[in-house]
Image: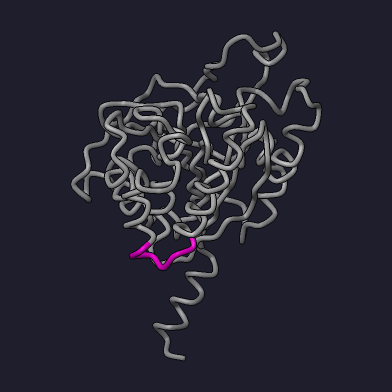
């Protein structure tokens, strides 16, 4: 093995993966639900994810389905507040805390990486952390000691643009930064709890898994054309695909690394999955 190959192998071994995780329904992991065990398997999966990493991340860039802007935006405050952007849940769920620090220098780095790829990006010093961030991270990294910056989606919901944004951020992985996409592989509010959507979600999930596990060039093209998948618009209605788009960012950041499905469960009559790259 040459010195260059050895360096590449060592670098790859220490490189952070990228993740697309389901963040559940509102604060579902921290309240009673019917049936009581509906979210238990997902919670168990999220709690175990940190143990799969090569080392503890220096920082996290989290792409949330719950933040859309005209252009990519990143939280740049030193201590962002929490945004309890869910409604009608028990009072105690509005007292949840996740005091993770922000990282202004990382936010600046993110915007510079985007800019270097010709992608408009901006820092937002006043934006807080929404529940797409703090609900899953309460399970994954409960100590809240790792700095986090949140990255928005863009309002055009263009899958190709989000894949390219992920490509621009790929160097962060070799800097000890974990890139996490927080959304849902199925997100049609009318479909949850309706058994007619079970087979629809199964077919879409099978297609999505095949797309993620395809070689990188084919993976990119399939995800860019995700609306052609079986049942695509029944699983993610038009102009409501924001819960799928974080997957495009983390897939773009995966580069040449392989992807795979690492979790799947039946919740509220639908199939919900998680994917990892690298």
Residue drawn 28% across and 39% down?
158
Whether residue 223 is situated above or below residue 111 in the rendered picture: below
**In the visual, does 98 lie left or right of 110?**
right
Residue range highlighted in magenta: 213-218
Colour scheme of this structure image? one colour
* 192 part of magenta stretch: no
**In the visual, does 224 lie left or right of 136?**
left
In the rendered image, residue 90, in percent from the top left (x then y), is placed at 71, 11
Residue drawn 61% across and 23% down?
26
Whether residue 32 is situated above or below residue 15 in the rendered picture: above
**In the visual, does 206 lie left or right of 124?**
right
The quadrant where residue 195 appears:
top right
Residue drawn 39% across and 60% down?
219
In the rendered image, residue 129, in percent from the top left (x then y), is placed at 50, 25
Q: Residue furthest left?
A: 118
Residue drawn 64% across and 48% down?
264
In the rendered image, residue 69, in percent from the top left (x then y), is placed at 31, 26
Whether residue 269 is situated above or below residue 173 in the rendered picture: above
Q: Nearer the viewer, residue 71 or 241?
A: 241
The quadrant where residue 21 appears:
top right
* 215 part of magenta stretch: yes
Whether residue 177 is situated above or below residue 232 in the rendered picture: below
Q: Residue furthest bottom?
A: 1
Q: Nearer the viewer, residue 11 or 219?
A: 219
In the rendered image, residue 185, in percent from the top left (x then y), is placed at 52, 41
């Amino acid at each position: 093995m040459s010195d260059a190959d050895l360096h590449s192998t060592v670098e790859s071994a220490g490189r952070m993966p990228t993740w697309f995780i389901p963040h559940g329904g509102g604060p579902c992991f921290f309240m009673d639900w019917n049936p009581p065990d509906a979210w238990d398997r997902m919670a168990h999966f999220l709690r175990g994810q940190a143990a799969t990493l090569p080392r503890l991340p220096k920082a996290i860039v989290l792409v949330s389905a719950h933040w859309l802007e005209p252009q990519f935006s990143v939280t740049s405050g030193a201590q962002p507040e929490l945004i309890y952007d869910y409604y009608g849940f028990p009072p105690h769920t509005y007292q949840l805390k996740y005091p993770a620090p922000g990282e202004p220098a990382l936010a600046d780095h993110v915007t510079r990486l985007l800019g270097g790829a010709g992608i408009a990006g901006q820092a937002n010093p006043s934006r807080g952390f929404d529940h797409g961030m703090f609900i899953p991270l309460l399970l994954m990294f409960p100590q809240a000691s790792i700095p986090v910056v949140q990255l928005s989606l863009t309002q055009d919901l263009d899958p190709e643009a989000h894949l390219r944004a992920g490509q621009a951020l790929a160097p962060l992985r070799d800097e000890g930064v974990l890139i996490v996409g927080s959304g849902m592989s199925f997100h049609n509010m009318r479909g949850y709890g309706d058994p007619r959507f079970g087979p629809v979600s199964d077919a879409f999930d099978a297609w999505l898994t095949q797309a993620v596990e395809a070689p990188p060039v084919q993976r990119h093209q399939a995800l860019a054309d995700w609306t052609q998948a079986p049942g695509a618009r029944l699983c993610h209605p038009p102009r409501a695909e924001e819960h799928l788009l974080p997957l495009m960012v983390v897939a773009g950041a995966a580069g040449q690394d392989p992807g795979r499905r690492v979790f799947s469960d039946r919740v509220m009559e639908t199939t919900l999955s998680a994917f990892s790259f690298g």
